[in-house]
Image (cartoon, rainbow, N blue to C red):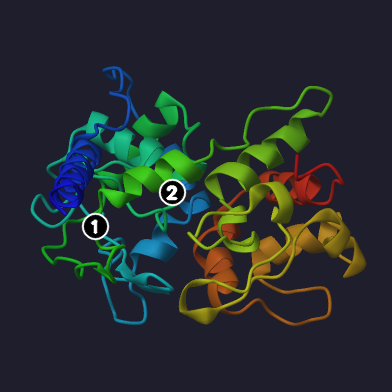
Amino acid sequence: MKRIIRLGLAGAVMASAGLAAVVAWPIGVPPRPFDLAGNVDRGAYLARASGCIACHTDVAGGGAPLAGGVKFETPFGTLYSPNLTTDKVHGIGGWTLEQFAVAVRQGISPDGQPYYPAFTYPFYGNFTDQDIADLWAAFQTVPPMAKASQDQDMTFPFNQRWGLKLWRAAFLEPPRTNPIPGNDDVWNRGRLLVEGAAHCAACHTGRNFAGARKSDTEHFKGSDALPGGGKAPAIDFDSLKKKGWTLDSLAFALRTGITPDGDAFGGAMGEVVLYGTSFLTEEDRRAMATYLLDDHSGG
């Protein structure tokens, strides 16, 4: 019996030590100092393409632009998007450019804590230093809103942020935005937008038990597990072709939200168009359509 007790105590000590190690485990890579001047117009354009306005503006609740508070109900609890205005207490007004870079590209807060992957940072990992400087310049023009977003309401154990370090180790994947040799500039521009800033796979790819994308088997195959119980259709090459989408009709839908049969996008996709892709250039919308309508676009 004493031996069993000793073994139990030893196991408890080892488990506690392991937990302490995970909690203390530093994540992320410190950014190089920035010496780039940001361009506000380019940053605003990238913010539109990246969905910042739609996810961080509580339109239904009458919230100010980028003041956060948008509700996302997930199987693991309820999340609320944070305040991204220049308020120094409730927003990002007290951040440095380097802290902003780590948050956007690595999903790590200024105090070193991992963000929940509902924040689509995995798609922004290949943003260049100039992209980050441009975004930062654009966000500096947002009026401060002295209002805190709601606290995240995650169920146990998902409310333990240290557990996200284990999630990252198991499931975090790099963006698929690198140019593919043999494809032209339009195709690769479409890839950069679709697989990166526009983060189409975040909604149009199935998820596993831990909420990670099934990128190897279900990339762009659709999902029925969007926040709040929503669904996203398949947008892989075969599915789009079967439904009759063409380069012109898809580019037009990304501008207007109108589908080939005269219907209109609703829900989350309607917001994507309204606050995002409708602001892109026609060239970029056609680049996205070109990439999606290629039978190797999931590569």
SS for callout 2: helix
- Which residue corresponds to mark 1? 160
Q: Count the marks.
A: 2
Amino acid marked by disc 1: Gln
- Which residue corresponds to mark 2? 47
Residue 58 in picture, x, y percent from top left: 33, 73
Left or right: residue 93 compared with residue 283: left
Amino acid marked by disc 2: Ala
Residue 283 in picture, x, y percent from top left: 71, 44
Residue 257 in picture, x, y percent from top left: 66, 71
Q: Quadrant of the N terminus?
A: bottom left
Tell me the residue at 76%/51% (across/down): 289
Residue 8 in picture, x, y percent from top left: 19, 50
- Label of residue 149 in the image: none
Q: Quadrant of the C terminus?
A: top right
Left or right: residue 138 compared with residue 109: right
> Does 200 appear above or below 102?
below
Tell me the residue at 75%/45% (across/down): 298
Is there any visible trace of residue 41 in the rendered image? no
Callout in the foreground (1, 2): 1
SS for callout 1: loop
